[in-house]
């Protein structure tokens, strides 16, 4: 009996979803490469067989790994490929592309951030890290130079402690952003070269998020301000992490807006060169401006982009 290339690829991608979670855990080599391969397989199976069959394969593949290795296996595994199920739902229900992408990356970010919420022992290691950094400064002669400038060792330790504590607080948002990037790159690759094959692609200068995404930014700001006002550490941390995530997303959308207007024939070429040179010389101000434009575009739609349904939107 002849088996077509499509059938062979179907069997291969299904086998990947079933076997790779167990193999990655058994070999203790879980990483973004494993997740990328599984996510591509999820997209392929979802496109060919639908949500139900893909969900069964994912549950079985991850379930076998958890049953075999219990908690140590669960701590190793990455769950970003599960966000592919949201994309499959969007394709089946013919959601607008920006809606499918938005909810997919939201789920991907949550799946990437949740494992970091149980991070323990960071505070215990902070003092050891500070001692190590101060020792390095001493060995390199930098501490002496700082003391000559009026910076005492105690002040240096205080600043290092604040930086480390801030970094520890935003670890969930950094993990979420990493998951966004991973999922977004693979989704873009799959949609561009597999689904659309050159037809109906949305150029980067036309990227935007659904208007209701602005409520997440409002929630982030309100949570941070209330947490800071009433000294609710968890609420303040939640707001801070959500703001970091939205800043990263707004940077992408703001860059899209920037390129859109640079390509617009309505803007004189001289003004375009002034904008480019200004951005080079005032990079920090330009970066903040791009983020602000990305956030406010959720409400004002500066480019007046239409709401178009379908996969190609």
Image (cartoon, rainbow, N blue to C red):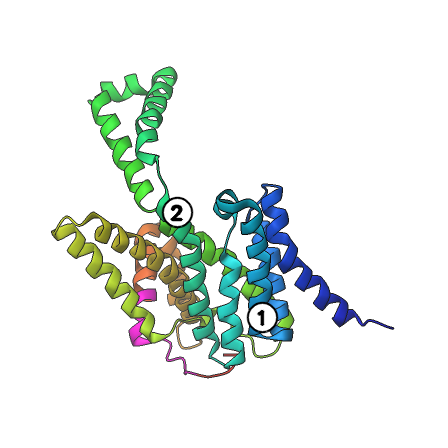
Which span is picked out in magenta? 294-307
Q: Does the magenta-highlighted stretch encompass residue 45?
A: no
Q: Secondary structure at mark 1?
A: helix
Q: Is residue 123 left or right of residue 4?
A: left
Which residue is identified by label 1?
A: 191
Residue drawn at 25 percent across, 36 percent down: 162
The disc, 1 or 2, on the residue closer to the chain's N-terminal end is 2
Q: Is residue 232 above or below residue 90?
A: above
Q: Give residue 240's mark.
A: none
Q: Which of these two is toward me, 89 or 239? A: 89
Q: CA distance from mark 1 to mark 2?
A: 30 Å
Q: Is residue 291 visible?
A: yes
Q: Is residue 67 left or right of residue 176?
A: right
Q: Is residue 141 above or below residue 36?
A: above
Residue drawn at 37 percent across, 74 percent down: 210
Q: Is residue 226 left or right of residue 259?
A: left
Q: Residues within 10 Å of mark 1 (few under 14, many from 20)?
A: some
Q: Is residue 140 above or below residue 233?
A: above
Q: Residues within 10 Å of mark 2 (few under 14, many from 20)?
A: some
Which residue is identified by label 2?
A: 116
Q: Which of these two is toward me, 280 or 17? A: 17
Q: How many marks?
A: 2
Q: Position of residue 301 (x, y in %)?
A: 34, 76
Residue drawn at 40 percent across, 58 percent down: 110
């Amino acid at each position: 009996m002849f088996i077509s290339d499509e059938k062979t690829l179907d069997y291969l991608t299904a086998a990947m979803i079933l076997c790779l979670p167990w193999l990655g855990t058994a070999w203790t080599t879980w990483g973004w490469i494993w997740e990328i391969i599984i996510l591509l397989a999820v997209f392929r199976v979802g496109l060919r067989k639908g949500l139900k069959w893909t969900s069964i394969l994912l549950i079985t593949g991850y379930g076998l790994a958890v049953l075999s290795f219990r908690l140590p296996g669960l701590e190793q595994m990455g769950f970003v490929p599960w966000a592919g199920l949201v994309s499959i739902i969007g394709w089946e229900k013919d959601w607008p592309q920006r809606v499918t992408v938005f909810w997919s990356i939201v789920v991907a970010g949550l799946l990437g951030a949740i494992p970091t919420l149980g991070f323990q022992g960071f505070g215990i290691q902070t003092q050891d890290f500070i001692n190590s950094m101060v020792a390095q400064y001493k060995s390199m002669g930098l501490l002496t130079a700082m003391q000559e400038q009026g910076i005492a060792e105690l002040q240096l330790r205080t600043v290092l402690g604040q930086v480390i504590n801030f970094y520890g607080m935003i670890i969930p948002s950094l993990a979420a952003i990493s998951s966004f990037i991973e999922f977004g790159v693979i989704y873009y690759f799959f949609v561009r070269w597999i689904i659309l094959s050159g037809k109906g692609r949305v150029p980067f200068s036309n990227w935007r998020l659904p208007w209701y995404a602005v409520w997440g930014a409002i929630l982030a700001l309100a949570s941070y301000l209330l947490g800071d006002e009433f000294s609710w550490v968890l609420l303040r941390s939640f707001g801070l992490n959500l703001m970091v995530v939205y800043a990263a997303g707004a940077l992408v959308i703001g860059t899209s807006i920037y390129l859109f207007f640079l390509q617009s024939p309505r803007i004189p070429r001289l003004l375009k060169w002034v904008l480019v040179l200004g951005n080079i010389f005032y990079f920090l101000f330009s970066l903040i401006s791009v983020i602000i434009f990305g956030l406010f575009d959720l409400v004002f739609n500066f480019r007046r982009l239409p709401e178009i349904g379908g996969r190609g939107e």
